[in-house]
Structure formats: structure tokens, C-alpha cells
Amino acid sequence: MQHEFPFVWFLAAFALYTVLLFVISHLTARRTAGRSFFAGDRKAPWPVVAYGMVGASISGVTFISVPGNVWVQNFYYMPLVLGFVGGYIVVAKVLLPLYYRMNLTSIYTWLGERFGPQSHRTGTVVFMVSRLLGAAVRIFVVMVVFHAFLPREWTAGGGLTAFALVTLVFLILLYLYTYKGGVKTIIWTDVLQTTFMLLAVGLAIWQICREPSVTWESVSRHTAWFDWNWGAGTNAVKQFIAGIFITIAMTGLDQSMMQKNLACKDLRAAQKNMYTTSAIIVAVNLFFLLLGALLCVYADGLGGFEGLGISKTDQLFPTIASRYLGFGAGIFFLIGLISASYPSAGAAMTSLTTSVCVDFLGFNDRQDWDENRKGRIRKGVQALVALLFFALILLLFVYSNDAVINLVYKLASYTYGPLLGLFFFGILSRRKVCDGATPWIALAAPLACLAINLLGKRFLGFDLGFTLLIVNGALTYMGMWISSLVAARKTA
């Protein structure tokens, strides 16, 4: 039976969870020095980091988009998830030893030592663009759902003003709870995020399974794992290979994710974290896909998208949870969504602040700035990051019409590719390069990928899908190799 979710319940759930996060922020920020904001004192227990990283990797995008995407893609997302495991192994065996050996705070410092200052800045800028866009999309999907819970008179005529107000309040609260504790706060709030998100999904599965119309036969119609159409972007082989490289790029070369690993006490603890996270990620994503299949069966019984009054797959879970599964499931859905939004967005804000302060402003080398001055500058940088998020989220509200999970990985394919090429050229080769050419290589590779994919789809009917990230990285690698030939000629 359909019902309207009371707005006061939404406010209560939001307020209670926010208070809980501020309590954790206060406890974790006590006796926090300036450098602790960036590195967490290198005392974080690896089981806590591993469990929390599951929630940080999933975020609100998986919470909303993965279940809904089953409607159009069955379980075709699963080969990508299996590829994640290979990516985590590469991160643990190749990248983490490098980061710990050099005692890095920002992982992009290595690019400067390997190639030169232009490469260092290029890596930092590429990460910042990647993280800004990715985090903005992740926050956006949550804000859209929050916006849907507002009274209808507030959202008349499109509701841009109401959406902007909800987003602004969220970002202000986000800034306030992370402005002191930094990565220590993020690690412990990630634990809350993972717990409440899984509780929300588990309760939704339990509620739907109680429906007499839900049978294994009806669910199995939505559980095909492999798409063998080689021209499709969801082809299983392309998905699996892409999953490996997506994890290397979006985890191993991402300051936000590595910042938590570098907060572990030593390399062995960080590697245990990676292996544990990879196993849990597979189980949790399968959990989300199972929910998606159940939601599809439930939606079929209500007349599909037309019967539900929705048009996008990202609306499937929020609509059923808030209108059809009862107030208990609706409350848990909201708490799960809220728990998915705060910490993942906070991690992005913290890592971007770290990159600006360490990579551009040189906090580690500025002996003439005392801790108070660095603190003031760092808080100003955080405020600027929040404003950039606000502007990007409003643009997405006006222009986005894609499934958010696909949008995230499309953006990652274009923006993380140069990082993939830069790091692996530096690791696999000892050649020197023309440092000044690196920014141009990092710009040319994504543009070339865009042209290749557009022409491939138009004339060959072939979509690179998420393997576009691999092509992007390979083109960057090739550009760095050509740059090394030029450098060798100059020194000959």
C-alpha cells in the first residue's frame, strides 16, 4: 500500500544522525595536531580502516544506483566487481610499498621526485578534478533523494531553490564536522556509514522477501551475470578488466582512499586492510544486486516504472523504500542514505584539502608558518572546496539525466586515466622525461579517448565502456615514453 513519508520523520532522522557524527567528530578531534589532520597520527587500526573503506567505496552512489540499474542491466555489474579484487591486490603489492617506503602524506609527491615539479602539479590537478567531479556526483544523488522528501509546495516549478538550500545546509554541516579532526574523523565515521548502510539494505531485502509474489523464479529473471556481446559497454570481459584498472586508479591512485591506508601503523597492516576490503566489497555488492533484483520483482507487481510514477532507475529504491515498505523501512533507508553521504563527502573534502595544502602550498616544507597560520589557511581551503562542490552539484541538478553509477565511472575513465599512465610509467621504467610536457600529455590523452570512443560507437558500433580508462592510461603512458625519447636526445 502506498503512503506519503512524513517530512518530520525525515528531519528527525537527519538531525539525529548529524548529532551522532558531531559527537564522533568531537571525540576523534581531541588532541589533534595540524599534521594529524592529514595523516591521522599513523595509529589507525587496520580492521577499522578495512571495514570503513567498504562504506567509503560504496557511498550513496552504490546505495541508490546499483540496485536500480538491475532493471536495465541485470547483474552485469558483477564482473566489474570481481575485477576489483585484482585491482586491490595490485594496490597492496605495488603501490602501498612505494608509499610507505617514502613515508608520503600526499601520494602525488612521488611524481615530483620521479619526474619533476610539473609532473607533481599535474598529478595533483588531475586528482583534484577527478575527486571534485566524482564527489560532486556522489553528493548530488543523495541531495536529489533528500529533495524528494521535502513538502511538495517547496519543490513546485522544479524546486531549484529548495534543492540549493538543502545542498547548502548539508555542505555547511559537512565542513563543520570535518574541519578539525580530518582523516581521523573520517576513518571512524566510515564505520558508522558501512554499518547503517548495510542495515538499511538488509531490512529492505527482508521486507520485500515477505511479499507472497516474490519467488526465486521471478527474482532469477533479473540475475544474469555475463553479457557476451563484445560491442556492448557491459561486455563481461571488458567489465572484468576495467574493474582491475578502476580499482588501481580510484583507490590506489586516489589521495582520499590512500590517505586512510597511510594512517595505518605500517605497511603490513595496510596490506591486510586491502585484502580484507576486497573480499567484503564482493559480498556487499552482491548484496546490493540481490536487493536490485527484488526491487525489480516488486516494481513489476506495481506496474513497472509507469505504475510507480518514476522515469529513472536511480528512483527505484528510494520510491519503493519510502512509499511502499512501511515507515520502519523508510526510516532505515533514510539513515542508510544519510550515513552514505556524510563520510564519503567528508573524505573527499579532506583529501582535496590535503592536496592543496601539501602539494600546492607546501605545508610540509614551510618552516616560516606556525601551526596557527597553517590551520587558518587549511580551513579557508576547506571552505573553498565546499563552495566548488556546491556549484558543481547545482549544475548536475540542472543538466544530469544519466544513471549516477554510470556517470561516476564515465568521469573516472576520463579523469583518472592520466594518473594511471603517469604512475605506471614511473614504476615500470627508469627513463627520464621532459617534465614540462607532462601537463600537455595529461590533457591530450583524455581528449584522444573521447574522439576514439565517439568514432568507434558511430562507425563500428563498438563502445569501450569502462575500458576507456585503460585506453586513457595507455595513451598517457605512450605520451610519457615519447617524452622520454625527447629527453634522451636532449641529454645525448
Image (spheres, helix red, strand yellow):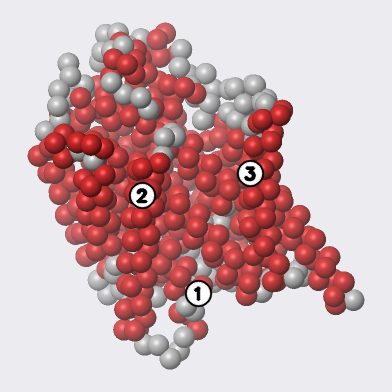
Q: Is residue 467 above or below residue 108?
A: above
Q: Residue at x 68, y 48 (%)?
A: 448
Specify which label sits upstream in the sequence, 1 or 2: 1
Cβ atoms at labels 1 and 3 below 8 Å apart: no
User: Does residue 7 appear left or right of residue 363 in this picture?
Assistant: left
Q: Can you give x and y, in whole percent of width and height, for residue 70 in the image? A: 44, 24
Q: Which numbered dot is residue 360?
A: 1
Q: Can you give x and y, in whole percent of width and height, for residue 136 in the image? A: 39, 50
Cβ atoms at labels 1 and 2 below 8 Å apart: no
> Looking at the picture, which amino acid does disc 1 mark?
Phe
- Residue marked by disc 3: 450
Q: Is residue 180 above or below residue 279?
A: below
Q: Secondary structure at mark 1?
A: helix
Instruction: State which quarter of the image contains the N terminus.
Output: top left
> Looking at the picture, which amino acid does disc 3 mark?
Leu
The one of 437 and 331 positioned closer to us in this rendering: 437
Q: Which of the two marks, 1 or 2, is nearer to us in this view?
A: 2
- Residue marked by disc 2: 393
Q: Can you give x and y, in whole percent of width and height, for residue 120 in the image? A: 60, 70
Specify which label sits upstream in the sequence, 1 or 3: 1
Q: Can you give x and y, in whole percent of width and height, for residue 491 in the image? A: 85, 77
Crowdedness near tag 3: few (<14), some (14–19) or many (≥20) residues, C-alpha within 10 Å? some
Task: Quote the CA–CA distance across marks 1 and 3.
Answer: 29 Å
> Looking at the picture, which amino acid does disc 2 mark?
Ile
Could one spot residue 81 in this view of the protein?
yes
Q: Residue at x 45, y 49 (%)?
A: 134
